[in-house]
Image (tube, rainbow, N blue to C red):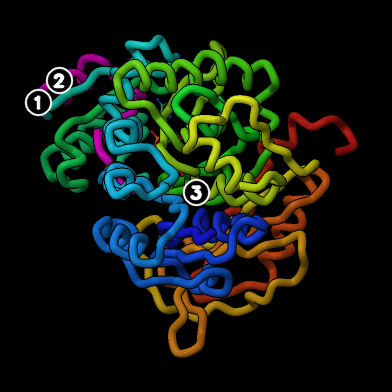
């Protein structure tokens, strides 16, 4: 079959890498892709948000299956458009993708279906939001309602920070229309975990628990990013917490969405805080996580096409995923300045794949005059598999050692939080 992957990041490189292992797949296209993806798929210069362009291409090439990486085309209705044209596409339809596209709507859904999450209030007027912050105090979390490329959430330790966040989002409109409303929510403490699950609208097939590293600096310091690294499985998610997340969060969310008339098909990503009262939802995403997809797909032993087809045909019940033993760790190498402004076009050295257990997934890279150069904030995701987390950490950082570009920075502590849960000797 012919497959089209939509997107250009590390997650999409991991999807392409995984799809290449499927005996069913004869040809892979990626729109728009990046310099690393170009080695493994035919990249086509169509933007991930150009729904008409993608539809036209998929029709012309008779694509059998399209897999959507990023959120913007999903909330923009790419799945609805492909379905109307009779094309197979993996991902939720526009209304269901609203679980990521509107934090206010997601919160209302969670309240209606008793899904544990932080207490919250929604505001559409900045004065009201500010009055609320003044009376309520800090710490508090201020979230722009709509999509803001992972930057619309401000964890505020003082009232002043919260007032500033409200002003930036609602008055200065730094995220445009995404900031017409804000969700102000209770600050939760605990360790974070991401559980991603396939669902066909009824059955839920969860993947291994993964852990992201949102803040830019070691020990979770500095501003939030799209994710500086991830690993799986995440031992903070004990079997009891995993079961609780499945039965109190993922299944009710999938049933709730179906009950609202917008059954969810695709990967549903639950970003959770493991609190003393159990797991609570920080956010839902309508897609694979980036960088969570990189370690998860490296451990994924089942044919991804089979699972995608089961999602599309409503036959996911009874399917299972085989996972490799051991663990996978992904370390993201970022451009100097990221998550703020950064330069592009820096030549990247040391990209030769050194061994089978380490894969360098490209994110923001481009090929210019025969050289691979930086072209985004997150540039590469060096991902290693090994028999346990400590060894996977060591292998991933060994992979990092060979790579360099001007301004490159990365966290040195990816995976460290897992170590305290491991039995002595691992
Ligand atoms: P979100 O995009 O909603 O997941 O938020 C991004 C990050 O902000 C999360 O991964 C957390 O690190 C942090 N965050 C979001 N909501 C809360 C909350 N209610 N309490 C504490 N931290 C939060
Ligand atoms: N790694 C967080 C996300 O994909 O949203």
The residue labelled by disc 3 is 290
Query: Please, which residue is most extreme toward the bottom here?
Result: 369
Front: mark 1 or 3:
3
Q: Secondary structure at mark 1?
A: helix
In the picture, the quarter occupied by the N terminus is bottom right
Separation (CA) of disc 2 from disc 3: 36 Å
- Local crowd at mark 3 within 10 Å, few (<14), some, or many (≥20)? many
Q: Residue 10's x, y, as percent?
A: 52, 58
| Residue 58 visible | yes
Query: Quarter of the image holding residue 157?
Result: top left
Look at the picture and state if 101 lies above or below 318: below
Residue on which disc 1 sits: 127
- State the residue at coordinates (49%, 63%): 363
Earlier-in-chain disc, 2 versus 3: 2
Cα separation, mark 1 vs mark 3, equals 35 Å
- The relative height of residue 356 versus residue 259 in the rendered view (above or below) is below
Q: Secondary structure at mark 2?
A: helix
Magenta region: 127-149
Answer yes or no: disc 3 within 8 Å of ligand 2: yes
């Amino acid at each position: 079959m012919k497959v089209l992957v939509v997107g250009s990041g590390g997650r999409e490189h991991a999807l392409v890498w995984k799809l290449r292992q499927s005996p069913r797949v004869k040809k892979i296209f990626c729109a728009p892709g990046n310099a690393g993806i170009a080695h493994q798929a035919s990249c086509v210069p169509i933007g991930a948000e150009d729904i008409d362009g993608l539809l036209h291409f998929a029709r012309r090439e008779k694509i059998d299956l399209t897999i959507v990486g990023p959120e913007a085309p999903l909330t923009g209705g790419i799945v609805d458009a492909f379905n109307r044209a009779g094309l197979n596409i993996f991902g939720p339809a526009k209304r269901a993708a609203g679980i990521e596209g509107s934090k206010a709507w997601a919160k209302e859904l969670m309240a209606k279906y008793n899904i544990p999450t932080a207490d919250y209030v929604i505001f559409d007027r900045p004065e009201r939001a500010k009055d609320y912050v003044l009376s309520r105090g800090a710490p508090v979390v201020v979230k722009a309602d709509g999509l803001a490329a992972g930057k619309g959430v401000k964890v505020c330790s003082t009232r002043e920070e919260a007032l500033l966040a409200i002003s930036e989002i609602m008055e200065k409109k730094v995220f445009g229309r995404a900031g017409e409303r804000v969700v102000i929510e209770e600050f939760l403490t605990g360790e974070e975990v991401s559980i991603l699950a396939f669902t066909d609208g009824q059955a839920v097939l969860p993947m291994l628990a993964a852990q992201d590293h949102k803040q830019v600096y070691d020990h979770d310091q500095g501003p939030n990013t799209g994710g500086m690294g991830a690993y799986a499985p995440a031992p903070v998610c004990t079997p009891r917490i995993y079961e609780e997340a499945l039965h109190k969060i993922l299944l009710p969310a999938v049933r709730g969405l179906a009950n609202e008339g917008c059954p969810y098909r695709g990967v549903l990503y639950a970003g959770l805080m493991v609190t003393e009262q159990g797991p609570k939802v920080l956010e839902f995403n309508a897609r694979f996580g980036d960088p969570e997809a990189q370690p998860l797909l490296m451990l994924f032993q089942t044919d991804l096409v089979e699972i995608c087809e089961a999602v599309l045909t409503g036959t996911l019940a009874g399917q299972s995923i085989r996972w490799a033993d051991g663990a996978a760790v992904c370390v993201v190498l970022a451009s100097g300045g990221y998550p703020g402004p950064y330069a592009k076009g820096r030549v990247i050295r040391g990209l030769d794949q050194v061994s089978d257990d380490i894969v360098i997934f490209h994110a923001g890279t481009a090929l210019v005059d025969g050289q691979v150069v930086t072209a985004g904030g997150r540039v590469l995701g060096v991902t290693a598999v090994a028999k346990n987390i400590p060894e996977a950490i060591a292998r991933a950082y060994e992979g990092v050692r060979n790579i360099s570009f001007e301004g490159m920075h990365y966290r040195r502590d990816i995976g460290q939080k897992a170590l305290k849960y491991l039995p002595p000797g691992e």
